[in-house]
Structure formats: structure tokens, C-alpha cells
Amino acid sequence: MLAAANGKIYAIGGYGGYQDDTLAIVEEYDPATSIWKIRAAMSTARSSLGATAAPNGKIYAIGGSGSLGDLTTVEEYDPITNTWTTKADMPTARRGLGVAVANGKIYAIGGANSSGVLTTVEEYDPATDTWTTKADMPTARSGLGVVAAFNGKIYAIGGRSYGGLPLLATVEEYDPANNAWMVRAAMPTAKSDFGVAIATNGKIYVIGGVASNNPYLSAVEEATIPSPTNTPTATPTDTPTITPTPVNRIRLPVVWRSSAGGW
């Protein structure tokens, strides 16, 4: 799992060649020098975890799967001191979850455990080291992508259902301010286990992943997200129009565009 903090990129945990060989290793990449460094390892070896950097400059490694099964474990990494600190456990043990930061809080979304694929959403406050249960995601899934956009909303994208199939193109938007979910335009391709990021242009990019008809993808899909600055007070139409430039319309749909593999 990757997270960025202090101008560096951190590769945290994962598999080490065998499915049961989970790792506690942490490696730091400096884009300025193109150099990797070994950093302090996590206390708990694990794969399929969630990891994200918070506004306090710390990185949080959340849940995952380890030698004892699905985990509730939360560890905080300080890149300045190169140390890990154990924090309050997540209420629900799970692997394959997505995590994102909005409003200074960390949201752990979906995933799977021995009970099956989950709709669970739990909010972590780094300032108080406490967890709060939030509104369930409408669609249960693991292996999804989760990203916070500049409009303050969180997007849960794709993933897989119980047993790994079917793969999903589902996109659902979470509003932390209202603790409410809304269905958005589906991705062009149903997939799981992809990379997802939001760029400085405000668009979301879904890169690679696994699809049922093509195990390993190189495709890139781009989503244009509604801008809160372009939300008038007019009454919404019954059927919002998908337009290349989302302006002067409220409750705009997410607009997707696909490109072939390669750059």
C-alpha cells in the first residue's frame, strides 16, 4: 500500500512472494533524488491494508490481513522521527478496504472479513484517537478504490463482490458533512485492485486493475467531478445532462472518459 507525506512516497506492508508471507516492511521513495530508503517497519506485518497520510503529517496503516487473520490494528507512522505508534483499534476487522481523508478525519470504507463483503464505514479522528460508525455504503465490496475530491466528497469506486465476482463498475459518493451516500455514474469498466488518485486538475484517475475478461489492465479512466463553486440555487432537472464541462447545473453526474493503455 502506498501513501505520500513530507514530499516522499511510502510503500507499506504487502505480500512477500507467497500469499501467506505478509510484510511489515516500509520503504521510502524520494521523487527529487529517485532514491529508495528502508524505514522503520510496522509492528504488525500485513497485506490488503488501508494506508493514508493525514493533515497532521502522519501516516496511518489501518486493518488488513495478517498471520492471525483479518485485523483491526491501526498504527501511526511519523516520517520525521521514523517511528510507529499503536493507536485505537478500528471497530471492524477487515481486509481489502479503502481509506480516504476528508475534513481532517480518516474514513475506512468497505472491505471483507470472515462475515463476507462489507458496506461498513468507520470514521477515525487522529486528534482524539477515536472511531465513529457512519452510514453504510450502499454497495458491499472489497478491493475498491476510495478517494477524496476537492468538493469535500469521498468517492468509492469499483471493487468486487462476495467470492470475487462479479467485479463492479459502481461509483458511490459519500458526503461527510451530511453522512449520506449518493449513486454516481458508473465507470466504463468493471474492475478491482486498481490505483486511484485525484490530480491537481480536480479529476479522478483510475489506473490499471483487474477485470473479469482481461486479468491485468493498462487502461486509464478519468472522472470529471462536480465543482461546488458551480452550484446555483436553481431547481435541479429530473434528468441531469452529462456534459464535458460541468457548469451551471446542480447535482451534476460524474462524467467518465476512457483512454487506451499506455501514455
Image (cartoon, grey):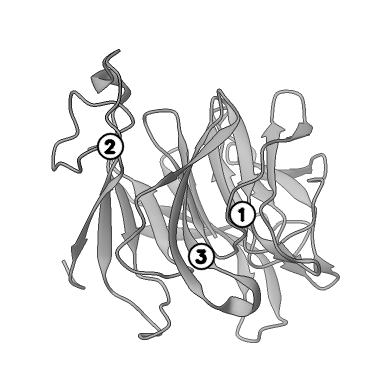
Indicate left or right for 90 with 212 as reference: right
Label 1 environment density (alpha carbons within 10 Å; few <14, some 14–19, many ≥20) = many
Give the residue number, with chain letter if any, for mark 3: 159
Which residue is rendered at x = 70% and y = 64% of the image?
Answer: 112
Q: Amino acid at mark 2?
A: Gly
Residue 260 located left or right of residue 37? left
Q: CA distance from mark 3 to mark 1?
A: 14 Å
Q: Secondary structure at mark 2?
A: loop
Residue 119 numbered tag: none
Q: Nearer the viewer, mark 3 or mark 2?
A: 3
9, 68: nearer the viewer: 68
Q: Which residue is mark 1?
A: 50
Q: Nearer the viewer, mark 3 or mark 1?
A: 3
Give the quadrant of the N terminus.
bottom right
Instruction: Please give left or right for residue 53 compared with residue 112 in the image.
Output: left
Q: Which residue corresponds to the image point at 59% horizontal and 70% vertical from the top-left?
A: 161
Residue 239 in view, yes or no: yes
Q: Position of residue 4 (x, y in %)?
A: 47, 45
Inspect this view and state whether residue 33 appears: no
Q: Separation of disc 3 and disc 2 at Cα?
A: 22 Å
Question: Which numbered circle lies on residue 202?
Answer: 2
Q: Residue furthest top?
A: 233
Q: Residue furthest right?
A: 68
Mark 1 falls on what kind of element? strand
- From the viewer's side, name the closer residue of 169 and 44: 169
Residue plotted at (60% across, 47% down): 137
Q: Quadrant of residue 235?
A: top left
The correct choice, above or below, for 222 with respect to 201 in the image is below
